[in-house]
Image (tube, rainbow, N blue to C red):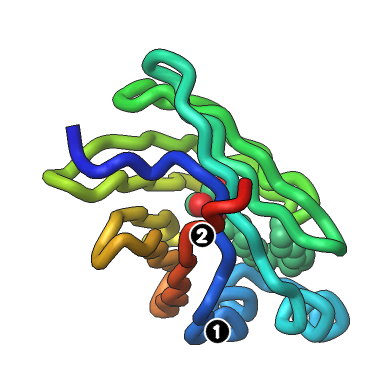
């Protein structure tokens, strides 16, 4: 089992979030709000289930997944699309493919140097976020 993704994580960098949001068709108005947010990830594991929460002062998004088990995801409060999502381990990386209207959509999580890394991709855009562990939570 790779290094645990579990915990409370604070965003310390966010590269090309704007490009990723443009690819998702997010309005200029929402992008401006989103760009200012300090995102937090709370990742919990319950048996073979993961819950990943993306928390901000503006909105919170939560998804429950079972590795290797395709599910219907509704990206409520994000781009509000329905996609078919599949999460798998690829070596030490937790990889999600989100099949739907947008091509080449998904994300990858991994731990590197004790930090939580996330790559979000959609069409030609890649957003890279890094989070540091919040040891107080
Ligand atoms: C989820 C947001 C921008 C709409 C609001 C911004 C609110 C806070 O997919 C994601 O995480 C995965 C992997 O950890 C688990 O779901 C990233 C945030 C991306 C895209 C959409 C702007 C409006 C942001 C919820």
Front residue of this view, candidates 54 and 25: 54
Can you see residue 101? Answer: no
- Does residue 131 appear left or right of residue 64 in this picture? left
Question: Is disc 1 surrounded by few (<14), some (14 to 19) or many (20+) residues within 10 Å?
Answer: some
Front residue of this view, candidates 83 and 126: 126
Q: Quadrant of the N terminus?
A: top left
Disc on the earlier residue, 2 or 1:
1
Secondary structure at numbered mark 1? helix
Q: Tell me residue 134's x, y (percent).
A: 55, 57
Q: Tell me residue 70's x, y (percent).
A: 41, 26
Number of marks drawn: 2
Above-or-below relation of 35 to 115: below
Q: CA distance from mark 2 to mark 1?
A: 14 Å
Q: Tell me residue 8's x, y (percent).
A: 56, 49
Residue shown at 62% from the left, 46% from the top? 137
Residue shown at 83% from the left, 75% from the top? 30
| Residue 41 - label | none
- Does residue 103 appear left or right of residue 2 in this picture? right
Above-or-below relation of 52 to 24: above
Q: Identify the residue under disc 1.
A: 19
Res 69 quadrant in image? top left
Res 107 quadrant in image? bottom left
In the displayed orientation, state which residue is furthest to the front: 136
Residue shown at 46% from the left, 26% from the top? 45
Question: Is disc 2 surrounded by few (<14), some (14 to 19) or many (20+) residues within 10 Å?
Answer: some
Secondary structure at numbered mark 2? loop
- Does residue 17 appear left or right of residue 26 in this picture? left
Q: Identify the residue under disc 2.
A: 102
Front residue of this view, candidates 121 and 1: 1
């Amino acid at each position: 089992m790779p290094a645990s993704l579990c915990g409370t994580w604070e965003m310390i960098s966010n590269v090309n979030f704007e490009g990723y949001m443009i690819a998702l068709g997010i309005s200029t108005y929402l992008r401006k709000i989103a760009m200012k947010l300090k995102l937090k990830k709370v990742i919990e594991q319950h048996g073979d289930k993961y819950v990943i929460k993306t928390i901000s002062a503006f909105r919170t998004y939560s998804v429950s997944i079972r590795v290797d088990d395709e599910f219907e995801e509704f990206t409520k409060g994000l781009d509000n699309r329905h996609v078919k999502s599949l999460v798998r381990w690829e070596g030490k990386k937790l990889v999600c493919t989100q099949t739907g209207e947008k091509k080449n959509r998904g994300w990858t999580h991994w731990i590197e140097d004790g930090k939580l890394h996330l790559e979000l991709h959609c069409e030609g855009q890649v957003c890279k976020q890094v989070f540091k562990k919040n040891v107080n939570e």
